[in-house]
Image (tube, rainbow, N blue to C red):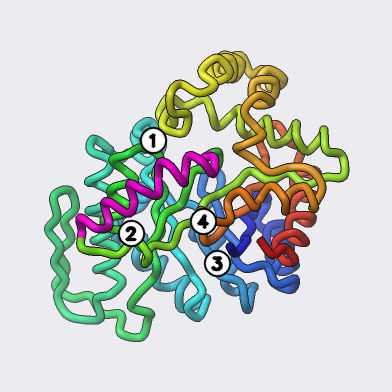
Amino acid sequence: MQIGLVVMDENPADALKVVKAADRAGVHSLWTIDYYNRSSLARASAFAAATENAIVGTSVTPLFARSPLALASAAADIQAIADGRFVLGVGSSTRRMNQDWYGAALQHPAPQVRDRIELVRSLIAHRSGPFRYAGRFDAVTMAHYDRPELPDSVPILAAAVGEHMIRAVGRSADGFVGHTIASADNLRDGALPLLAAAAAEAGRSSADLRITTQIVAAASSDRASARRDAAAQVGFYSTPKGYDALFPGGQHQAERVASRESLARNDIDGIVAAGQAMVDDRAVYGSPEDIVDQLRRYADVVDWALLYPPHFGVESQRIHANEHLLIEIAAAARV
């Protein structure tokens, strides 16, 4: 299992300092996030230019926040800058985010994701001449599309939580990105069998799928403080009802309700308290030795573990200090 780092700094200049340090240290892969206040693709381009060895990826880019052509063009550009080290991680985002943030309609998420991945891959692969794609949801027609000098492939990993989306990933993507608070058991017993079945139905081998997951990771010599930060992130991410599949059989129902109610009244301490009951199998935290030991539960489940510094309810200085400890862990750990 290779260990990478999701770089969380809000200021891109700070993020680049972290990325350069991580690349010098030998961290396997470096990942950007996408939110209303940051662009995963712009940052990935900067990360690619600032590094020499690490894989650079997005974790994840919303598939419907940009047109297919804009997404494909950006991905091909970044792959050229990275000299083949770029991985495009994508996800559907929620219906509300698509509607309210991006002005996009997401009525049939799983088949729309399959359609969009196929289109983006086709655009990247196309060299010159007319281009036409007519899918169930997406259509692009161009009399001329000429990019012969750019890379013709970019690995596409896709995030999924529920059964239908996991199956869509198994049928269409080059790999899978597990949710930040998916437990190792959830991935092993839930996601992996669905991915394998869907890949087989599509005439593909599940062995060809790259299995990755983000993992909330809080490193500190103060174990209680690290656990608190991890619990804040887990509690926050437990609130959407769309993530019920991460809690099969109604696991932690009371804590999720408490966290949801705390979020509604902006009660950070309440979210932390709820997260404390869920954090032990959905995050890694503590000293570097603690974290390496806890990461072993993912070793037979994923190919790449992406350490995700908690940021909800965490001061920026603590985020930054955590990132530098996680660089040491990611560069040195053998799990």
Which residue is label 1 attached to? 94
Q: Is residue 107 toward the left or the right of residue 29 in the image?
A: left
Q: Which residues are magenta?
A: 182-202
Instruction: State the mark number for residue 241.
Output: none
Judged by depth in the image, the label closer to the viewer, 2 or 3, is 2
Could you tell me if residue 98 is visible in this image? yes
Residue at x 13%, y 67% (from the top left corner) = 132
Which residue is label 2 attached to? 173
Spatial CA span between label 3 and label 1: 25 Å
Which residue is label 3 attached to? 56
Spatial CA span between label 4 and label 1: 25 Å
Spatial CA span between label 2 and label 3: 18 Å
Spatial CA span between label 2 and label 4: 16 Å
Residue at x 70%, y 31% (from the top left corner) = 313
Amino acid type indicated by mark 2: Ala
Instruction: State the mark number for residue 302.
Output: 4
Relative to 93, say whether 134 is above or below: below
Spatial CA span between label 2 and label 1: 19 Å
- Mark earlier in primary sequence (2, 3): 3
The residue tagged with tag 2: helix, strand or loop? loop
- Mark earlier in primary sequence (2, 4): 2
Quarter-of-image position of residue 18 = bottom right
Secondary structure mainly formed by the magenta segment: helix
Relative to 165, say whether 238 is above or below: above
Amino acid type indicated by mark 1: Thr
- Mark earlier in primary sequence (2, 1): 1
